[in-house]
Amino acid sequence: MAAPTSTSASSSSKRHSILPSVSQAGPKPPVQFSSSITIADSALLTGSHMIVVGSESVIHPRARLDSSGGRITIGRRCIVHERSIVGGNAATVTLSPSRGSKTSDMLLSPLPSSAGVTLADYVLVDVGAVIEAGDTVVGEGTTVGVGARVCAGAVVGKHCTLTPHTVVAAGDVVPDFTVIYSKGLRRRDLRGVPELRNKGQARQIEVLRRMIPSNPGKFSS
Amino acid sequence: MSRRPPRGEYIETDTGNKVARKATLVGTQNIILGGKTVIQPEVMIRGDLVRSVQSASAASSSGASANNTAVSIGRYCFLSRASCLRPSGRFYKGAFTYMPLRMGDHVFVGHGSVVQAASVGSHVHIGARVVVGELAIIKDYVRVLDDSIIPPNMVIPSFSIVAGQPARVIGEVPEGGHEAFELRDLYKTVGNNPHPVPT
């Protein structure tokens, strides 16, 4: 194969990225960032509720954090990949009775500020995943695969693995150490390596922090 | 495919690459396009996730741009709308690093697919909404059907047809099916002055 020529779309070799400008539509949310996070310049943060991002977390470009459905809390050492949506679709909040006493309040009152999305520590949200708002909780060390969808009110346990394009129904409770794969099948993850996975994620974060130019000042006003 | 795109939607380079203005290419100095490649709008290519082992020793990355390839694409490739190409990462000698994604010629990536493979061969047709897991290796003349999920580290041999979730080899490309993988005609139908779709 002949050596390919290196091309960037405009012939300037100094241009680093072709990023169509992201217009900051929607309200600018109040944010509370830890000092050590890495958030890309073209991440999209909208909504009216608070967005809290824990220490050493990484938000890739074009990730969307939408707090219009409630406050978003991201734990420590999480990675949110590009094109994923954390907190979207607040209009379709429907809760099953398994959520306990808050159910009737949710349906009647407008978006309560304590609801939203909570990601525990060491969560990995892969490309294009959607985590809807509405008291959704994703437990520690869980991997939400490419294009997976966690519907509103679902509670995902610790160290789970949602393989790509799986869907967790609204209000569903996923126990710890579960693997969801292939159109809804579930099995228990017997590998017993949660600490190793977390350590691996920490190392990945160290590398990502050097590679992604971070701009938290853009979002905190 | 017979719609007429508005004027100036694509940027055409000297080597014949057609890159849409609305495509998101991060880190373009680490992306190599072979020539006559089409990149449709809303495509996302992560060129900033480069191998980090060399950058620790080299102070500036401008001189070492040949070694810092993140994504390398061959000739006549076609990346459909909303697809995403990103290098895959692995632990190498105790450190986490990104391996470059190398694609061959005549590769068609369908609508909304996410390709995170280690390498993709030539004349590969990847359908829509496909997820190619990390460090997967796809050999030449492979057809991946729509909605397949290829698990990480899978190796797909040449001339196979792959489908399912998780993906399995379900068949083989028939003897006379090699011409179907050619993308030259598809390349001509896209762009600022598109030719009509061949019947």
Image (spheres, helix red, strand yellow):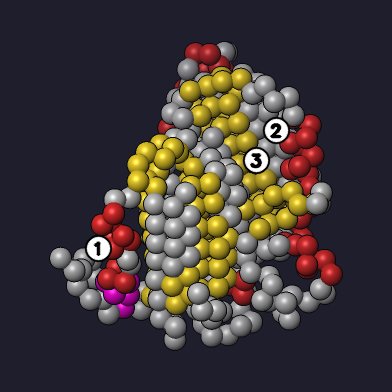
* Residue marked by disc 3: A124
Q: Residue at x 26, y 76 (%)?
A: B194
Residue A63 position (above or below residue A74): below
- Marker disc for residue A89: none
Is residue B47 placed above or below A124 in the rendered structure? Answer: below
What residue sits right under mark 2 in the picture? A141
Above-or-below relation of A106 to B194 = above
Left or right, A205 with reference to A68: right
The secondary structure type at the circle numbered 2 is loop
The foreground one among B82 and B33 is B33
Residue at x 67% of width, y 52% of height: B89
Residue B60, image x, y percentages: 78, 77
Q: Which residues are magenta?
A: B187-192
The answer to which of marks 3 and 2 sits earlier in the sequence is: 3
What predominant SS class does the magenta segment belong to?
loop
Residue A18 sits in quarter: bottom right
B112 vs A39, left or right, is left
Chain ID of residue with mark 2:
A
C-alpha separation, residue under disc 1 versus residue under disc 3: 36 Å
Amino acid on which the number 3 mark rests in the picture:
Leu
In depth, the one of A22 and A200 nearer the eye is A200
| Mark 1: amino acid | Met
Alpha carbons under labels 3 and 2: distance apart: 7 Å
Residue positioned 81% across, 73% down in the render: B58
Residue A151 place in picture, x, y as percent: 49, 30
Q: Which mark is residue B1?
A: 1
Is the Cβ of the residue at disc 3 closer than 8 Å to that at disc 2?
no
